[in-house]
Amino acid sequence: MLADIESILITETQISARVTALARSIAADLVTLPREDEIVFMPIMNGSIVFAADLMRQLPLKMRFRVAMISSYPGTSTTSRGPHIVGSLPEDLRGCHMLLVDDILDSGQTLQLLRSEMQQRGAVSIRACVLLRKRLATTTSEAQSCEYVGFEIPDCFVVGYGLDYDDYYRNLPHIGILKPPPFEVPA
Ligand code: 5GP
Ligand code: MG
């Protein structure tokens, strides 16, 4: 598996320090809400699985846990086909304070879709936390806005720490850049 990685962009140690800092600022904000027990921690699966597991254990809040399944990169594609919800989302979120957690913010479509779904279901506040945000030349800064961001990264396809290519590499402990797959090597 390691032989497939061209370079490491963010090390395990860097991730761990940043997750701790993110958790501190999230907890400091959410603890001021009138009712902690109405917080819903919502990881976007599958990419945020590792990040969410590390982050939630550093949030000393009484909060619920509900997952959202979104698919936008089927199989071996490395460009988004547009996000769509897989399975169901909780029907009634009246009175809830949502914390959406995702691995990476690219075009922003995934978070925009979920924010509007949460709003329609009656959530009173919606915050999002992403580990990575890609610096894009083409997207407006509004589409990429997010309350909590771990790292700003260049516009390249990354894997590891939950992020996949064709469902592989999620178990890498760091964020890496893949060697070009065979189909992308010029003839
Ligand atoms: P957006 O909807 O913001 O364009 O894309 C967000 C989703 O696309 C992420 O949740 C993630 O699943 C996927 N994605 C975007 N960029 C990358 C990337 O560089 N690597 C991987 N593995 N997934 C990505
Ligand atoms: Mg995703």
Image (cartoon, rainbow, N blue to C red):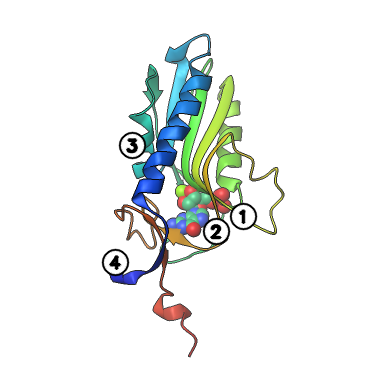
CA–CA distance between discs 2 and 1?
19 Å
On screen, residue 110 versus residue 176, left or right, reads right
Say which residue appears at 58% left-offset and 22% top-offset.
125
Residue linked to disc 4? 2
CA–CA distance between discs 1 and 3?
25 Å
Closer to the chain start, of discs 1 and 4, is 4
Q: Give residue 135's mark.
A: 1
Bin the neighbour count of mark 2 within 10 Å (Cα to Cα): few under 14, some 14-19, many 20 and up.
Answer: few
Q: Which structural element holds mark 4?
A: helix
Marks 4 and 2: CB-CB under 8 Å? Answer: no
Residue type for callout 1: Arg
Residue linked to disc 2? 81
Q: Which structural element holds mark 3?
A: helix
* Residue 120 in picture, x, y percent from top left: 60, 27
On screen, residue 118 versus residue 41, left or right, reads right
CA–CA distance between discs 3 and 4?
23 Å
CA–CA distance between discs 4 and 2?
28 Å
